[in-house]
Amino acid sequence: MTDETKTLWWNDDTNSIMLIDQTKLPVELSVIEVKTVERLAEAIRRLEVRGAPALGVAGAFGVALSAVSCTSDAEFAETVAADAQLLKSTRPTAVNLAWGIDKVLRAMENLPPEMAKFLALTAAKTIAADDEKCCMLLGHNGASLLPQIGTVLTHCNAGALACSTWGTALGVIRSAHKMGKKISVISCETRPLLQGARLTAWELAHDNIPVTSIIDSEAAYLMRQGKIDCVVVGADRITRDAVFNKIGTYMHAVCAKHHNIPFYVAAPASTFDLDAVETDIVVEQRSRDEVAAFWGKPNLPEGVPVINYAFDATPLDLVTAIITEKGVFYPPYDFSSLGRCNPCR
Ligand SMILES: CSC[C@@H](O)[C@@H](O)C(=O)COP(=O)(O)O
């Protein structure tokens, strides 16, 4: 991945979506060309593209793809609406997906097909470009919270691969590194799909930011030993009372509180869902297969069930600060300055 490479982008020559196949990393850096909405839905379900802001961009490009590839004016509105619904149904928790889809749908609302196609694509490209700007700003806003010299724990991948580029939690770390701070990172491997080991460690090693991988259950002991100065994670959705992020985040927040370690969340305004509270949200549960086998070998007796939540919710009273592109929020949290940024319900 070069500094110019994006996680996903629109190919104007072929009217298709190009995306880095995140299931192949760190072994292979390869790009998939997505030509249909059905293939995009599959890519989202399989986590070939993943991470909240990247899903927002994927959803936006997906609606544009549906629009530009529709050949029937008579069935245009119906086709785009059905495709949007299909894409929304792929992953319920990361709010950016529905946000990106709805934003493009609104841009083309009630317009004749030719104009709607043009405006859908323009809106989707703007969402992708804005995501990059948000990450840079957010990174800058958060960098001052990190110590001059220190070790930051992160969970899952909230990096360039989870966004258009740069990242949210890793954006903060990248910005601090760029400012000259001597930051090293502890990256939790993030069972079961190892986004922390496969993606975060890969990204940081590529940028020459010191990174060490640990198994998830090691974090508390490292905190007890005084080896972690702060925690920075991303978010898939922030409601009025909780931060939803990759499963395991909540246990890091509880441990950080116990050890008096700052726990920061970095996310763009598009990840906020301020009409909702924790109990309103559907938390994605994934298949047994992801947990019941490791490297292709079964590690569970047949018939033993699995609970495989993809995300958990961390109550805001465990969060030291939330870093956004619009500034840093501290308790008692009042997000009114963000406006109603996520009108997707
Ligand atoms: C900037 S991304 C923040 C979150 O989306 C990230 O931490 C996360 O939980 C991603 O989960 P994933 O299941 O890999 O899509």
Image: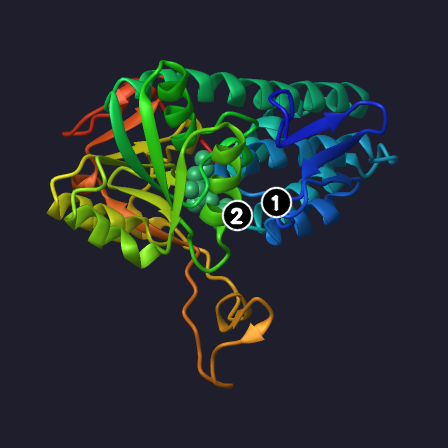
Judge by depth and name the residue closer to the eye, 99 or 164. Answer: 164
Q: Is residue 90 left or right of residue 185?
A: right
Residue found 37% across the figure and 16% down from its top: 140
Q: Is residue 115 left or right of residue 61?
A: right
Residue found 60% across the figure and 22% down from its top: 3
Judge by depth and name the residue closer to the eye, 170 or 18. Answer: 170
Q: Earlier in the sequence, mark 1 or mark 2?
A: 1
- The vertical placement of 193 against 14, above or below, is below
Q: Amino acid at mark 2?
A: Arg
Q: Secondary structure at mark 1?
A: loop
Judge by depth and name the residue closer to the eye, 233 or 81. Answer: 233
Residue 135 image-quadrant placement: top left
| View extreme (right): residue | 71
Label pair 1/2, CB-CB below 8 angstroms: yes
- The vertical placement of 313 against 290, above or below, is above
Q: Amino acid at mark 1?
A: Gln
**What is the quadrant of the C terminus in the image?**
top left
Q: Which mark is residue 198?
A: 2
Q: In this rendering, does residue 134 appear at all?
A: yes
Q: Residues within 10 Å of mark 1 (few under 14, many from 20)?
A: many
Provide residue 313's location: percent of width, then percent of height.
Answer: 30, 49
- The vertical placement of 294 against 111, above or below, is below
Residue found 30% across the figure and 58% down from its top: 217
Provide residue 205's location: percent of width, then percent of height.
Answer: 50, 35
Provide residue 189's location: percent of width, then percent of height.
Answer: 42, 52
| View extreme (bottom): residue | 302
Q: Is residue 35 left or right of residue 330?
A: right
In this view, the mark in front (1 or 2)? 2
Q: Ligand 1: does it lie within 8 Å of the C-beta at label 2?
A: no
Q: Which mark is residue 22?
A: 1
